[in-house]
Image (cartoon, rainbow, N blue to C red):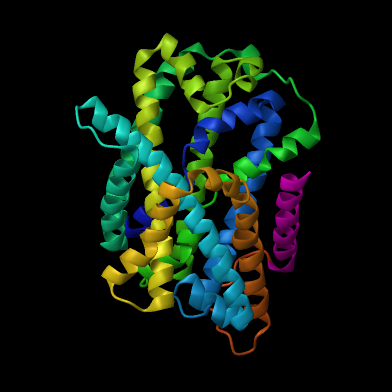
Amino acid sequence: MNLKLIGSSLIISGTALGAGMLAIPMVLAQFGLLWGTALMLFICLGTTYAALLLLEASINVGGGLGMNTIARKSLGKSGQIITNGLLYALLICLLMAYILGAGDLLNKLLRGIGVELSLIQSQIAFTLVAGIIVASGTAVIDKLNRVLFGIMLLMLVLTLVFLVPDISFENMTQVTNSSTTDLVKTSAIIFTSFGFMVVIPSLVSYNHDATPKQLRNMVILGSLIPLVCYLVWLYAVVGNLTAEQLIHFTNVSELISVFSAEHAFISVVLSGFTGLALLTSFLGVAMALFTQNQDMFKQNKVVTYVISFILPLTGAIYAADQFLSVLSYAGIILVFLAVFVPLAMVVKLRKSENAEKTYIAEGGVAMLTFSFAFGGFLLISQVI
């Protein structure tokens, strides 16, 4: 796999990795590492296969297209409208969240060096600068993301250096909640932590010279990196803290504060990791929205830039309170967009006699059935 494909895998990983990584131990520790690991492996398998289905649809309708055109060519006009609606709802909600989080982080950082900006000014500054990077093209995002991801991994390794020596075997074998229902309820958080599929069409376009096998490996590698990071972090945190401690935390900052009491350096490292995770996730999601708008509106980069970022920025500035309630539905939107829509696309294309069959995801009918059941499981987990 060449550097371009490796960089694309890191874009997938960077889009998935977010502040949710720090929250995973707080929701899974109570069920024990065995069941927590099993659930994470199951959800990683389901999301990866759904991404491969979207990859199949993207390649077989011609490649180099946004979700708008892929949906039209595979599902028809009605499917195109539904897919666009789901995609825009999800991407705008996510970008609003990243602008809110990154704006707050930038505001604190600037105050620390003596630069006074309001929170709104910080949000605008972050969106303008990060938006310019996105508008510069996937190649620029790829190269920047490689650097950012390398720094993130370094920060994770440094944190583990401090935490691993203090791991307690007794903590790692604790189970304080054996409720299957409660375990299933956590699936939404884990699933969202693997939510990278929106970048697949952009990366197929970016790697237009790659073979289907290379693109498949790109997706698989991109999904395995977050899995390894999540599991390593889960084991390190659970090994250092009891399950009772973890379930009483109400936010990530409390978790960081506990570790900081033992190692002051960890606070800086984890805060930096969170900021970079927000930035890499923003770049991935914004790239998906920018590509979608290019495909849909066929305008130049300046117009596409304005179309792509004006609504998320406006929402972050004026509708933060309302957005927090809307965000709770993002997981359900993601289930339909990341699982059921690619499944419908592939079923339709495989039945069509005129459609190309350049790439077909492995597994046949059995894996298509699994993907449908996986989507149903996720929906149930969010409504029980």
Furthest residue to the bottom? 354
Any magenta on residue 383? yes
The residue positioned 46% from the left and 21% from the top of the image is: 256
Residue drawn at 39 percent across, 12 percent down: 263
Q: Where residue 280 appears, x then y in whole percent?
A: 38, 46
User: Which is the main secondary structure of the residues drawn in magenta?
Assistant: helix
Please give left or right for residue 125 compared with residue 376 in the image: left
Q: What segment carries the magenta color?
A: 364-384
Q: Is residue 116 above or below residue 239?
A: below
Give coordinates of residue 11: x percent, y percent: 39, 52
> Is residue 257 in view from this perspective?
yes
Q: Position of residue 124 (x, y in %)?
A: 31, 48
**Left or right: where does residue 344 sit relative to residue 302?**
right
Residue at the outermost front position? 318
Q: Seen from this angle, which residue lies furthest left? A: 114
Picture quadrant where residue 122 is located: top left
In front: 374, or 337? 337
Q: Residue at horizontal 47%, vertical 46%?
A: 97
* Quadrant including the N terminus: bottom left
Question: Quick check: 53 above or below 279?
Answer: below
Looking at the picture, how far across and down is residue 292, in whole percent? 43, 69
The answer to whether residue 45 is left or right of residue 264 is: right
Residue 252 painted magenta: no
